[in-house]
Image (cartoon, rainbow, N blue to C red):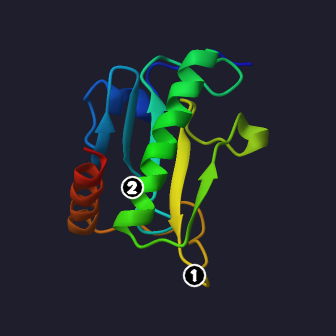
Amino acid sequence: MPAYDPNNIFAKILRGELPCYKIYEDDKAFAFLDIMPRASGHALVLPKTPARNILDVSPDDLAHVMKVAQKIAKASVEVFAADGVTIQQFNENAGGQVVFHLHVHVIPRKIGVAMKPPASVKEAPDVLAEQAKQLAAALR
């Protein structure tokens, strides 16, 4: 498996070198909205420690990321009046991973509404800012 690249886009977001629509942060995890969401409220949850994916993350960091993903899923159902939640996590190229810092997708879903194709539509900044504000408030 290739080594972790500290210059991946999510590492830069974690270091504050790139902006994001943050919704949650604690000492071990960070979460923000996907700028090309597959549905309204599509969030990404990352460990703060460098981990390429599930194959090299520590079990404790993985468990914490999933705990945060669950917390965000519950808030997303409330904020977006969702009927359910899709949780996705990809590992290495063959597994569909595009950004090589472990991340979990939390995607609120409504019955009868298909997800948009991956990386297909960039959401308007004002929409993302409002959604981030609502989710962050629900997570407090």
Q: Please tell me which residue is depicted at 25% across the width and 41% down the height of the picture.
A: 19
- Is 67 above or below relative to 15? below
Nearer the viewer's eye, disc 1 or disc 2?
2
- Is 31 above or below relative to 11? below
Tell me which amino acid carries mark 1. Answer: Val
Q: Please tell me which residue is depicted at 45% across the width and 64% down the height of the picture.
A: 77
Q: Please tell me which residue is depicted at 48% across the width and 53% down the height of the picture.
A: 73
**Residue at image mark 2:** 75
Is residue 110 visible to us here? yes
Tell me which amino acid carries mark 2. Answer: Ala
Q: Residue extending furthest right?
A: 94
Label disc, if present, on residue 113 of the rendered structure: 1
Q: Which quadrant of the figure contains the C terminus? A: top left
- Mark 1, residues whose alpha carbon is within 10 Å: few (<14), some, or many (≥20)? few
In the rendered image, residue 109, in percent from the top left (x then y), is placed at 54, 70
- Is 56 above or below relative to 22? above
Choose between 136 and 3: the one closer to the eye.
136
In the rendered image, residue 68, in percent from the top left (x then y), is placed at 46, 37
- Mark 2, residues whose alpha carbon is within 10 Å: few (<14), some, or many (≥20)? many
